[in-house]
Image (tube, rainbow, N blue to C red):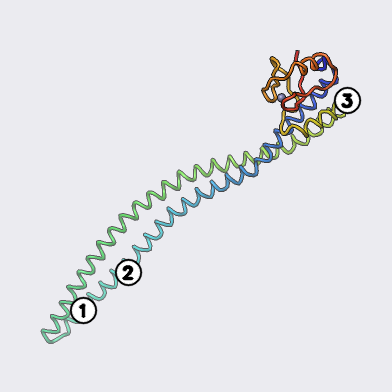
């Protein structure tokens, strides 16, 4: 039986290194995408902080413009009061008095507006602070995750090179005819495994039942046998 054959065992070693290298390659290919995803998550979190801070800034700007309006009304009121001291005619005095009343009303309504804005500022400050502390923590942990990915990428690059050498060693140790059959199989089968043991007459690569001819070929012939369903090389483990 071929699986007892030491040459076939060497081919199995080639296959296992090939599979590891395939998995590593997949992981390595995935990492740049994961890093980009992580970066966009980080940006989103930072944008949220910026938006919360922006709300606070615009409320503060609103407050200071109301403040200016109130100050200018107060100035006008005191100017009118000074004029009242100087006018001689009663109608002029009354006209100024009316204007002052009007200005006082404006002042009081501006002051109400300002109180509303100040209350909003307190709320926005609290929201911005909570957002900042929560999000900063989140951003830190995302940054750590990103660094982990970069480290894994570097490790994988080194391991991939080592494995390539090990794979080459295993291949140079394996019989040419077996390698040729194996490489052909790799072209036919789209993804690993390329060699699969039979279990209860089923190919463990495709999970389908193989014919009796295949089973007897595996048990008797000393050559590579392929699953008649998926084309993988099949063998018996015992
Ligand atoms: Zn199969």
Say whether mark 1 is within 8 Å of ligand 1. no
**Residue 206 image offset from top left, x and y in percent:** 68, 25
Query: Which residue corresponds to the image point at 31% horizontal and 66% vertical from the top-left?
Result: 67
Query: Which residue corresponds to the image point at 75% horizontal and 27% vertical from the top-left?
Result: 231
**Residue 42 image offset from top left, x and y in percent:** 54, 47
Spatial CA span between label 2 and label 1: 19 Å
Q: Residues within 10 Å of mark 1 (few under 14, many from 20)?
A: some
Q: Which of 33 and 157 lies nearest the eye of the viewer?
A: 33
Residue bearing the label numbered 3: 175
Query: Which secondary structure, mark 1?
Result: helix
**Residue 157 image offset from top left, x and y in percent:** 73, 39
Foreground tag (3 vs 2)? 3
- The answer to which image quadrant residue 151 occupies is top right
From the viewer's perspective, tell me whether residue 10 is left or right of residue 228: right
Q: Residues within 10 Å of mark 3 (few under 14, many from 20)?
A: few
Spatial CA span between label 3 and label 2: 91 Å
Residue bearing the label numbered 2: 68
Q: Which of 60 and 201 lies nearest the eye of the viewer?
A: 201
Residue bearing the label numbered 1: 80
């Amino acid at each position: 039986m071929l699986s007892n054959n030491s040459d076939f065992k060497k081919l199995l070693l080639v296959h296992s290194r090939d599979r590891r290298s395939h998995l590593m390659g997949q992981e390595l290919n995935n990492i740049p995408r994961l890093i980009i995803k992580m970066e966009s998550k980080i940006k989103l979190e930072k944008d949220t902080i910026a938006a919360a801070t922006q709300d606070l800034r615009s409320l503060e700007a609103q407050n200071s413009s109301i403040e200016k309006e109130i100050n200018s009304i107060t100035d006008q009121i005191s100017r009118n009061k000074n004029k009242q001291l100087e006018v001689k005619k009663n109608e002029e005095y009354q006209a100024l008095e009316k204007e002052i009343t009007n200005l006082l009303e404006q002042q009081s309504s501006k002051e109400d507006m300002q109180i509303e804005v100040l209350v909003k500022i307190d709320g926005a400050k609290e929201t911005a602070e909570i957002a900042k502390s929560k999000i900063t923590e989140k951003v830190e942990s995302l940054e750590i995750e990103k660094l982990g990915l970069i480290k894994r990428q570097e490790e994988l690059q080194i391991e991939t090179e080592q494995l390539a050498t090990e794979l080459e060693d295993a291949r140079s140790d394996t019989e040419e005819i077996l390698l040729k059959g194996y490489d052909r199989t790799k072209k036919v089968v789209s993804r690993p495994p390329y060699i699969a043991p039979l279990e209860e007459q089923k190919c463990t690569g495709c999970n389908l039942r193989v014919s009796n001819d295949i089973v007897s070929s595996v048990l008797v012939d000393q050559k590579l046998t392929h699953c008649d369903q998926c084309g993988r090389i099949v063998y018996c483990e015992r």
